[in-house]
Image (tube, grey):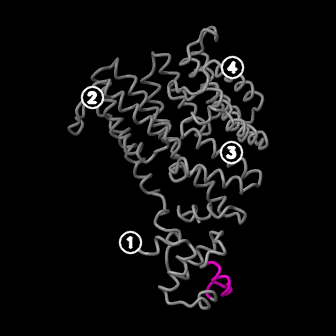
Amino acid sequence: MDTSDLLPVGRRVAYWRGRRKLSQQVFADRLGKSKSWVDKVERGVRSLDKVSTLHDIAAVLRIDAAVLLGRETQPAGVTERGEGVARIRVALSRYEVALGRAAARRPVLPADQMARQVAHAWTTFQHARYPQVIELLPGLLTDAERTRAGDPLAGRVPLVEAYRITASLLVKLGDPDLAWLAVDRAMTAATGDRSLVAAAAVQLGQVLRACGQARVAKSAMLSAAYRIAPPVVEFGLPPELSLCGTLLVQAALAAANHGDARAAADLLDEAATLAARVTDGHDHHRTAFGPTAVDVARAAAAVELGDIRDAVTRHETALRRDGWRWLPTEHRAAHLLDTARAHLHADDPINAGRLLIDVDRIAPAEIRQRPAARDLLAQLARDPRTPTTITRLAVALGLG
């Protein structure tokens, strides 16, 4: 281990300056700074809070800027993410069952075992462990398709769920076109089962919105929601109420996407009525639907509509609910990113930066693997008012 790995940033600067045999004065001259400025940085009296300054120092010292931040913050594996998506694409392109191709010595799993594997993948996704999900999905898809071929009835549910996970992950990773293929497979496999169709339609809404098809998404979500809705809400079971409510939320977000504030509000009010009957702390059909989820959706809709004050107010309301801590990590992290975007739009990089740090604390992969989050981080890092921790994170991820 290089001894500099254990040092604070300022001491790393001093360490590498010594390695390059530069005096403080010579180093300062090359940076266009004073010797006093260099001394304060090296003693930790002055923080390095600008990406450009870190890059200037790294250039003079002939090292990568990430080295100044230590090995614990090495650049994220963007290449690995791309390779993982490519493996998922290959898995979706094999058509082994349809073409009668033999899988490479993989046993056909019984439906109950397949269901357990899919449940594990869902849990991993909801904990925002996206690199692990990327590794799981190619084999999971192959196994689920073969299980369905061997047991068409019992194998249908795990296959649809495997496609749902795939679509959700690919939307996160910024590949909505490939996600569309996965969700189309889910909808086709689910056809004939009202609940399965409604569950797959949740991801359909996400994919359509990610593809810029907000009006189509709203129409499809309403059709799916009212198809699963119980005739009398008071007699509805929590699983079907959760699906119906989540689809209404998707429809509301689609309405917000194309600027229809009234429709978004009405649909979220309708969803809130269902959520009150489901209550928080449940995760029927992997929806995490309940009053807190609706509050979070109200905040997301406000961000889309440009109502920043309302978005921040809704965020604060959601955080005060007991149900906040029961939402899946992935759900909470996505909401914090939405609220950070609201703060950025309000020219408040300090609070936006604090929220991104919270995201990095609870779900590091949300920042490292999700292009939308990386873009937001890059925007913040360019603002001189941004907290130093954001600057360091941006440099560590190669976004400086």
Where residue 227 appears, as percent x and y from the top left, is: 58, 15
Is residue 14 rendered to the left or right of residue 122? Answer: right
Q: Residues within 10 Å of mark 2 (few under 14, many from 20)?
A: some
Quadrant of the frame with the N terminus: bottom left
Measure the C-alpha gap from mark 1 to mark 2. Answer: 45 Å
**Disc 1 and disc 2 in contact, CB within 8 angstroms:** no
- Can you tell which of label 1 and label 2 is closer to the viewer? 1
Q: Where are the magenta residues, as a range?
A: 30-41
Which residue is tagged 2?
109
Is 33 included in the stretch rendered in magenta? yes
Q: Earlier along the polypeptide chain: callout 3 or callout 1?
A: 1
Q: Which mark is residue 26?
A: none
Q: Element at badge 3?
A: helix
- Can you tell which of label 1 and label 4 is closer to the viewer? 1
Which residue is tagged 3?
339
Where residue 31 appears, as percent x and y from the top left, is: 63, 84
- Can you tell which of label 4 and label 2 is closer to the viewer? 4
Measure the C-alpha gap from mark 1 to mark 4. Answer: 58 Å
From the image, give the main secondary structure of the stretch colored magenta.
helix
The residue nearer to you, when weighing 361 against 240, is 361
Measure the C-alpha gap from mark 4 to mark 2. Answer: 41 Å
Q: Which mark is residue 273?
A: 4
Which residue is tagged 1?
1
The vertical placement of 78 against 286, above or below, is: below
Residue at the limit of the structure toward the left, as seen here: 105
Q: Element at badge 2?
A: loop
Measure the C-alpha gap from mark 3 to mark 1. Answer: 39 Å
The vertical placement of 186 against 359, above or below, is: above
* Residue under the image location 38 percent in, 40 percent down: 137
